[in-house]
Image (cartoon, helix red, strand yellow):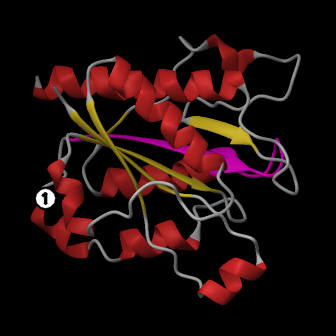
Amino acid sequence: MPKVLVLYYSSYGHIGTMAEAIAEGARDAGAEVAIRHVPETVSPEVAAKAHFQTPVHPEIESVESLADYDAVVVGTGTRFGRMSSQMAAFFDRAGGLWASGKMNGKVGAAFTSTGSQHGGQETTLFSIITNLLHFGLTIVGLDYGFQGQMNGEEVVGGAPYGATTVAGSSGQRQPGEIDLAGARYLGARVARTAAKLFG
């Protein structure tokens, strides 16, 4: 049974909801799954003023604990077309883990949320994937076996590079069923790939 970590940062809950769906897909595919969030880097005063939501999942124990998993799926909202500073700060502390080579050959994937349809989803996914590649992970994307991402009739997330959702300019839009289905599909793909590599 592969061990999958869903690691995320979420200010307003959208990414936390997507993390749950990814975990569900991975569990349904036979994986043991943990969901963790990275530490907040802004002060409690700033977080309160911006109405940040308190994450419902435990905080990750340490950077080094990533090596305990066969696969890591990383999610964060976009900040001007790249990953959030909170997620970047977490990876910036991982030099020792990188140097150890303990992540080489593990499975990685990415997910994100933006305020608009063209708010930098793909570049944010690539900013996550770039980090994962430097750690030696084998990347799994959201292939076109998930046809929901081809829907042109409504606003939906999804890209070949990972699962996504559109939150709206003020966070008013929650992940829809197609977005969540894409997240579950990605979680299942990660779990199946990890099982083939480590089973």
What amino acid type is highlighted by mark number 1?
Answer: Gly
Q: Relative to residue 137, is residue 195 depicted above or below?
A: above
User: Residue tagged by mark 1?
Assistant: 101
**Residue 10 located left or right of residue 137:** right
Q: Secondary structure at mark 1?
A: loop
Q: Is residue 47 above or below residue 175?
A: below
Residue at image x 57%, y 39%?
Answer: 18
Which residue shows up at 57% across the image and 61% down it?
83
Front residue of 138/37: it is: 37
Quadrant hosting residue 1: top left
Would you place residue 85 above or below residue 114 in this image?
Answer: below
The spot of residue 188 in percent (x, y) is 39, 22
Q: Label 1: few (<14), some or many (≥20) within 10 Å?
A: few
Q: Residue 2 at x, y = what percent?
A: 19, 30
Magenta span includes 127: no
The residue sitting at 71% across, 79% down in the picture is: 48
Q: Which residues are magenta?
A: 106-123
- Residue 5 lies left or right of residue 3; in this view the side is right
Residue 7, how many percent across, how many down?
Answer: 41, 52
Residue 77 in picture, x, y percent from top left = 64, 56
| Residue at 67% from the left image edge and 88% from the top image edge | 45
**Relative to 12, is 6 above or below?**
above
Quadrant of image for the C terminus: top left
Q: Is residue 29 visible?
A: yes
Going by the image, does 181 lie left or right of 109?
Answer: right
Residue 108 covered by magenta stretch? yes
